[in-house]
């Protein structure tokens, strides 16, 4: 198997998985768009390895594959940081919801108790 | 008899005054005693227990003792619990909030002194080391406390010796700030909240208090843990100083 077919298979599997997850509503479009874009990019690089070689020459990287790895790890790092901030936002929101919920519960409790007292 | 906040009309009336907020996490053994003590020492103040996702009977013990209790569905940290308390105080129109630990560490007879301090300040911290009591710390933990105290004193323009104290009083102005921004970060409930108050233009001062020995005793006294504490405190302080808050 050549790097060419390996790249194509990787891209195809990514596309399939993303499509299937979209179909099962496990992934929302706003996240899927990025992965689809990435899969297409991988496919392009697999079909035209010259692109990668040219990019490596341009950036002064001796082995084109190393450029690929470097860029790939940077992209994954960026995605992780982005997801971390997303989690932070979600945590803030759950925290706010928990506070609100506790207040609503207390208020309802008191309303019920005072209702029982009046009866 | 404690007046319950029954509905909106009444809550608006009973609201004016002091609310004592007691954040509690698994304190079923001490919470009842703390509530009884508060009733005796501050009969005119309203109480609010914030149960921060306790897995024991804290909430029901508090309810049995007759204190209104905010029950958080899961643990969100002292910062979150306190923000809930400050929001409650703001919505019910309280003039001042006193924060007291549920473990009985804080001597409630000093609450009057804390509230007195609110006359010319927005946030008053009940400080150990300030003459009363015999609390002492050594090694890295002491350095951390010194560093924090010196930095925050410089920011406040007033001597603050015990910035990690959770025994404090806030007036309306500080309540408004804390209802919006009470950080959930590590040490956020103590150090960063003071920094936020200062950055929002609140005047912060301290009043000396004695504290009782904690029942769990020697937590974070080992040199290693104390050093970690020092590092984390520095990081927390540094971040607090540069973090962006939308303080209006």
Image (spheres, coloured by chain):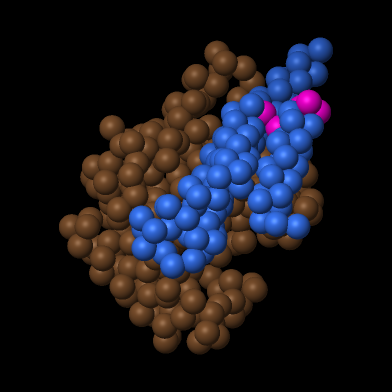
Left or right of B91, for residue B32: right
Q: Is residue B25 above or below residue B49?
A: below
In the image, what residue occupies the spot 59% across and 80% down? B218
The answer to whether any part of residue B2 appears in the image is no
Say whether residue A24 is magenta. Answer: yes
Letter of the brown chain = B
Q: Quadrant of the N terminus of chain B?
A: top right
Q: Is residue A113 above or below residue B100?
A: above
The answer to whether any part of residue A76 appears in the image is yes
Residue B43's image quarter? Answer: top right
List x then y, in percent, for residue A78: 50, 50
Front one among B246 and B42: B246
List x then y, in percent, for residue B193: 39, 51
- Identify the magenta region: A23-28
Left or right of B51, for residue B161: left
Q: Is residue B2 above or below residue B76?
A: above
In the image, what residue occupies the spot 54% across and 61% down? A65
Letter of the blue chain = A
List x then y, in percent, for residue A69: 54, 60
In the image, what residue occupies the spot 50% across and 19% down? B12
Front one among B158 and A30: A30
């Amino acid at each position: 198997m050549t790097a060419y077919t390996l790249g194509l298979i990787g891209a195809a599997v990514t596309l399939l998985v993303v499509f299937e997850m979209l179909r099962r509503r496990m992934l929302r479009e706003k996240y899927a768009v990025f992965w689809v874009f990435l899969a297409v990019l991988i496919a392009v690089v697999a079909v035209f390895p010259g692109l990668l070689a040219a990019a490596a020459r341009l950036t002064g990287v001796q082995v084109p594959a190393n450029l690929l790895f470097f860029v790939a790890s940077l992209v994954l790092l960026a995605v992780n940081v982005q997801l971390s901030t997303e989690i932070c936002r979600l945590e803030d929101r759950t925290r706010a919801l928990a506070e609100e919920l506790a207040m609503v519960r207390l208020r309802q409790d008191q309303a019920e108790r005072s209702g029982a007292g009046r009866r | 008899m404690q007046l319950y906040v029954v509905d909106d009309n009444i809550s608006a009336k009973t609201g004016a005054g002091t609310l004592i907020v007691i954040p509690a996490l698994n304190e079923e053994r001490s919470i009842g005693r703390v509530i009884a003590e508060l009733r005796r020492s501050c009969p005119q103040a309203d109480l609010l227990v914030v149960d921060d996702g306790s897995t024991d009977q804290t909430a029901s013990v508090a309810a049995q003792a007759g204190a209104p209790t905010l029950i958080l569905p899961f643990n969100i940290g002292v910062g979150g619990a306190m923000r809930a308390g400050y929001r409650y105080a703001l919505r019910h129109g309280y003039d001042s909030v006193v924060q007291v630990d549920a473990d009985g560490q804080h001597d409630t007879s000093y609450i009057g002194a804390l509230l007195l301090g609110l006359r010319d300040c927005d946030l008053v911290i009940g400080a150990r080391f300030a003459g009363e009591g015999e609390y002492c710390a050594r090694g890295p933990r002491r350095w951390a406390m010194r560093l924090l105290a010196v930095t925050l004193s410089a920011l406040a323009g007033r001597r603050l010796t015990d910035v990690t104290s959770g025994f404090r009083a806030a007036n309306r102005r500080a309540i408004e700030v804390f209802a919006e921004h009470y950080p959930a970060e590590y040490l956020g409930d103590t150090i960063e909240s003071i920094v936020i108050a200062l950055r929002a233009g609140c005047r912060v001062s301290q009043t000396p208090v004695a504290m009782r020995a904690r029942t769990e005793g020697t937590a974070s006294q080992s040199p290693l843990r104390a050093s970690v504490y020092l590092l984390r405190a520095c990081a927390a302080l540094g971040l607090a100083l540069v973090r962006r808050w939308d303080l209006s």
